[in-house]
Image (cartoon, grey):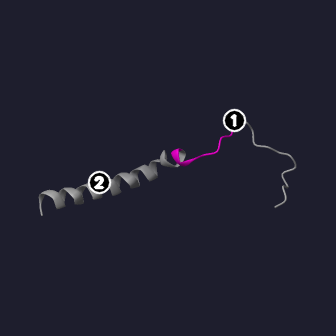
Amino acid sequence: MLDTSRGRTPAPTEEPRGCLFALSQPPLMIFLTVIGTLLLMAAIHDLFLL
């Protein structure tokens, strides 16, 4: 593809956001906590109650 940015480069202070940035978002952490809790409860149920 053709580069149409006319030599413009990102500022040195701008860093690409990776997966650690995504994991630091509160809604994702709440979702992962709920899923992890449900899996833990299912595992405890299977181990001790069945």
Distance from the alpha carbon under mark 1 to that under mark 2? 38 Å
Residue in the image at 85% along x and 55% along y = 4
Location of mark 1 (residue)? 13
Q: Is residue 2 above or below residue 26?
A: below
The residues colored magenta run: 14-20
Horizontal and vertical percent position of residue 42: 23, 60
Q: Compare marks 1 and 2 and give the one earlier in the sequence.
A: 1
Q: Is residue 39 magenta?
A: no
User: In what element is the residue under mark 1?
Assistant: loop
- Looking at the rendered image, the quarter that the C terminus falls into is bottom left
- Tell which of 46 and 34 is nearer to you: 46
**Helix, strand or loop for the magenta stretch, by majority:** loop
Residue in the image at 48% along x and 44% along y = 24
Horizontal and vertical percent position of residue 17: 60, 46
Residue in the image at 48% along x and 48% along y = 23
User: Tag 1: Cα neighbours inside 10 Å, few (<14), some, or many (≥20)?
Assistant: few
- Looking at the rendered image, the quarter that the N terminus falls into is bottom right
Residue in the image at 54% along x and 45% along y = 21
* 46 left or right of 7 in image: left
Disc 1 marks a residue whose amino acid type is: Thr
Q: Which mark is residue 37?
A: 2
